[in-house]
Amino acid sequence: MPSKPKEKPQENAVAGKDDANIDLTLRPTAWDEYVGQEKIKDNLRVILEAAKKRKEAADHLLFSGPAGLGKTTLAYLVAHELGGMIKTTSGPALEKVGDLAAVLTNLGPGEILFIDEAHRINPMIEEVLYPAMEARKLHLVVGKGPSARTLTLDLQPFTLIAATTRENLLSNPLRSRFGATFRLGYYSIDDIKKILERSARILGVTASSDAVEVLARASRGTPRVANRLLRRARDFAEVHGKAGSPGAAPVIDAESARHTLEMLEIDDLGLEPQDRRLLITIIEKFKGGPVGVNTLAAALSEERGVIEDIYEPYLMTLGFLQRSPSGRIVLPAAYRHLKIKGYEELL
């Protein structure tokens, strides 16, 4: 078991890096660093330990849930646990059968193939993926017309890990071929606070318990959002924070955390301007709903997928929005949060 890195090298590791690289630095690299999703981690440990004892490739795994909850991180942790290499791609990147064939034939024994945005895999690609997942066979059609023939290639034992934010868009044949499916849920406030405390140590900043509380409650139960807010609070503390000793780490207190949220126009529950605009549009233009998602997308000049993937899941978790057969409906809790008076008359 590798020893846990000391904090000082971690602080130096983020110096001079852009946000994308810092995201990678903040990503957990061991099970004990991954906070939350305890049931999923317990189940994964059993699956992986059994596969190692049998000296076989682990079952194919499907991770679903809103963006930013740690699906990619889990895939890398699985690869680390199995001691194999991981190769990554995405559904939209697999445009042709040849793209998938090139990836699969280059996998070594026990390696992991991670496909992000699996719900966007081309149906023609899926047809090739089925026998690869079930029998480790790759069936390719060579040539066209009467001279066409089928070529079958044997694949090395591998594990496919797929991630999706829209499990309902996966075809039933593809979904059924995964040995285990895990849906990641939003994190509790306590788990987000632990994540923020760890990230603050890695970034080399000092955050008070009150500041961590403020940022955690505005993080939408999502580690990616929590780390983004922490970085912006660090920026604010460095520019507007109280002067400390030269070379000292920036200090994030509750006041600077609140100012950070005000600058970003994020309220204490994590609602951003786009979330409030969606709710207010339904209230003002459609009398609180119901309104169809296509009509709502046109009114907001947004893509339907953005509304369904980004905005709605968290608003429904808060009890602010409801999906019904006739459309979207704003619930009383949203009126109260937005401090809209006389909302009882609209219900």
Image: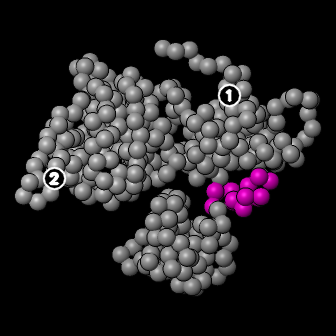
- Circle nearer the viewer, 1 or 2: 2
Task: Please determine whether, in this image, residue 325 is positioned above or below residue 106.
Answer: below
Residue 262 magenta: yes
Describe residue 314's horizontal placement relative to residue 79 as left or right: right
**Mark 1 crowdedness (10 Å alpha carbons): few <14, some 14-19, many ≥20:** some
Q: Quadrant of residue 204?
A: top right
Q: Quadrant of residue 318?
A: bottom right
Q: Which residue is mark 2?
A: 143
Residue 96 vs residue 4, the one in the foreground: 96
Q: Can residue 132 be seen from the camera position used here?
A: yes
Task: Please determine whether, in this image, residue 24 is positioned above or below residue 219.
Answer: above
* Cα gap from disc 1 to disc 2, whole angstroms: 52 Å
**Residue 39: where, in percent of width, then height?**
40, 36
Q: Which residues are magenta?
A: 259-271
Mark 1 touches mark 2? (CB < 8 Å) = no
Describe residue 92's horizontal placement relative to residue 51 as left or right: right
The amino acid beneath tag 2 is Gly
**Residue 344: where, in percent of width, then height?**
58, 81
Q: Can residue 58 be seen from the camera position used here?
A: no
Image mark for residue 13: 1
The amino acid beneath tag 1 is Ala
- SS of the residue at dot 2? loop
**Residue 42: where, in percent of width, then height?**
38, 31
Residue 145 vs residue 326, the one in the foreground: 145
Residue 84 vs residue 205, the one in the foreground: 84
Residue 271 vs residue 346, the one in the foreground: 271
**Mark 2 crowdedness (10 Å alpha carbons): few <14, some 14-19, many ≥20:** few
Please name the predominant secondary structure of the magenta segment in the image: loop
Task: Please determine whether, in this image, residue 125 is positioned above or below residue 284.
Answer: above
**Residue 183: where, in percent of width, then height?**
38, 47
Counting residues from the N terminus, which is met first, the one under dot 1 or under dot 2? 1
